[in-house]
Image (cartoon, helix red, strand yellow):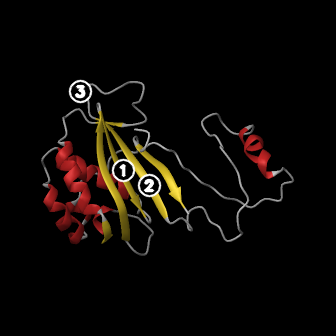
Amino acid sequence: MQEYMRFGQVANFKTNSSIPIEKFAIAINSNLKKSILIKSAEEVDEKFHSRLTCKRKTYCYVINNSLMGTAIFRNLETHIAVPLDVKKMQEAVQYFKGEHDFKAFKASGTSSKSSVRTIYEAKVKKEGEKIYISLTGNGFLYNMVRIIAGTLVEVGLGKIKPEEIPNIIDSKNRENAGKTLPPQGLYLVNVEY
């Protein structure tokens, strides 16, 4: 689980503050809700933009695939009580690797001009009752990871065959892909610049 759950949110802003950079995280944390924590701060070039200058992002989607689920983590993962065929999901996820037009995996209302993205790494791993879907790419469309995860669940349920994934991608038709899974379970775990 550790390799999938390194949290890596990055933000940037301009300031005229006189607070020394090494004290910035402490100063900001003292004014934030307890649900948010700044781990570190550093000065960057004026041209840096935390969203637009990143080279790669890794998202992880967490599914609890037990019969009863869990009360404690119910808002942090998606519960699917029906057993999923993880081997088929692992086979299917490989088809997402590479540069593709992911139009079939974008939510309506997406403002991106192009739906072409590159997926560098795509993995499905089961640990106990949890299934982790990990995707690393140069960028993601709105709800793209949740739709890919939903499509992989359909594969795990036997509703879509792994070898059908290339046809779904090539169709560029949202109706051919799986459902958009709920936001519970989606994590941005790493951003590389």
Nearest the viewer among 50 and 190 is 190
**Dot 1: element:** strand
Whether residues under marks 2 and 1 lie with C-beta atoms below 8 angstroms apart, the answer is: yes
Whether residues under marks 3 and 2 lie with C-beta atoms below 8 angstroms apart, the answer is: no
Q: Amino acid at mark 1?
A: Ser
Nearest the viewer among 146 and 21 is 21
Nearest the viewer among 22 and 182 is 22
Specify whether 19 is left or right of 168: right
Specify whether 8 is left or right of 131: right
Residue beneath disc 2: 58
Q: Counting residues from the N terminus, which is met first, the one under dot 3 or under dot 2?
A: 2
Q: Position of residue 68 (x, y in %)?
A: 27, 25
User: How many discs appear?
Assistant: 3
Kindly indicate the quadrant of the structure image that contains residue 47: bottom right
Q: Amino acid at mark 3?
A: Leu
| Residue 40 in view (yes/no) | yes
Classify 124 as above or below 71: below
Q: Amino acid at mark 2?
A: Thr
Could you give the CA–CA distance between mark 3 and mark 2, rounded to whole angstroms? Answer: 28 Å
Q: Position of residue 154 (x, y in %)?
A: 19, 49
**In this rendering, which labeled residue sits more in front, label 3 or label 1?**
1
Q: Which mark is residue 134?
A: 1
Residue beneath disc 3: 67
Which residue occupies 31% across, 27% down?
69
